[in-house]
């Protein structure tokens, strides 16, 4: 499996990430398209990433994603010329195929829970080992399943308390995750 999709609270996934950081020598950097002066710095702990666990938008596509590399791997940043002029700098899996990405999802607004995802594009040894480790921990901690999603106990309780489990608040309710 090249990815794991899940619904959970930040505290529930935090324990898995702590174990991951203890087992693997890794570094973390926010993904995205940046001005040169805004390129984020690499962090030794995912918990040092600004905005981690906070959802600024009701659309999971716009959520913070974190590139995760072996600590000794070089981070490659690619130049992206802009149509209106200037250059932005991309931090993504395209130039860093050894990496995995971590997106935690989380609560948005009063009654929305957005999903998280951990994924990779390539099958590097690090990516396979990291994904296998995190996937095993997710399967162990999040006992419920609905489609491709692993559901934590707190996310399941939130659903039964009336929360929407959805990747985008603008999509029709018919497309929200249903749990039985």
Image (tube, rainbow, N blue to C red):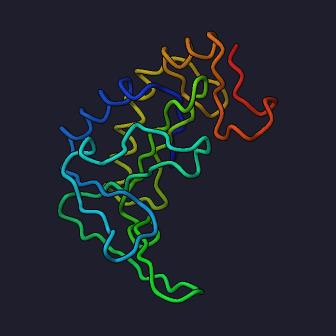
**Is 88 or 179 nearer to us in this picture?**
88
Residue 150 locus on image (x, y percent): 54, 27
**Is 111 or 160 nearer to us in this picture?**
111
Residue positioned 61% across, 23% down in the render: 111
* On-image quarter of the C terminus: top right
Residue 45 locus on image (x, y percent): 21, 45
Residue positioned 51% across, 45% down in the render: 3
Q: Is residue 138 left or right of residue 160?
A: left
Instruction: Identify the image quadrant of residue 15.
Output: top left
Q: Is residue 79 above or below residue 119?
A: below
Residue positioned 42% across, 29% down in the render: 138
Residue positioned 43% across, 38% down in the render: 54
Residue 50 locus on image (x, y percent): 31, 48
Q: Is residue 98 left or right of residue 116?
A: left
**Is 136 or 42 nearer to us in this picture?**
42
Residue 47 locus on image (x, y percent): 26, 41
In the rendered image, the residue lying farthest to the bottom is: 85
Q: Is residue 143 above or below residue 97?
A: above
Total numbered badges shown on the rendered structure: 0
Q: Is residue 163 left or right of residue 52?
A: right
């Amino acid at each position: 499996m090249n990815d794991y999709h899940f619904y959970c609270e930040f505290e529930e996934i935090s324990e898995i990430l702590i174990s991951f950081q203890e087992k693997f020598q890794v570094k973390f950097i926010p993904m995205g398209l940046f001005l040169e002066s805004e390129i984020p710095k690499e962090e030794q702990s995912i918990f040092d990433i600004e905005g981690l666990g906070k959802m600024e938008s009701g659309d999971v596509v716009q959520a913070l994603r974190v590139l995760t590399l072996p600590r000794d791997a070089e981070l490659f940043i690619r130049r992206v010329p802009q149509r209106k002029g200037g250059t932005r700098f991309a931090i993504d899996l395209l130039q860093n195929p050894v990496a995995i990405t971590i997106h935690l999802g989380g609560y948005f607004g009063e009654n929305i829970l957005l999903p998280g995802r951990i994924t990779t594009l390539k099958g590097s040894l690090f990516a396979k080992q990291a994904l296998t480790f995190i996937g095993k921990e997710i399967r162990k901690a999040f006992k419920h399943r609905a489609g491709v999603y692993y559901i934590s106990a707190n996310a399941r309780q939130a659903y039964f308390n009336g929360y929407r489990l959805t990747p985008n608040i603008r999509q029709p309710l018919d497309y929200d995750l249903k749990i039985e």
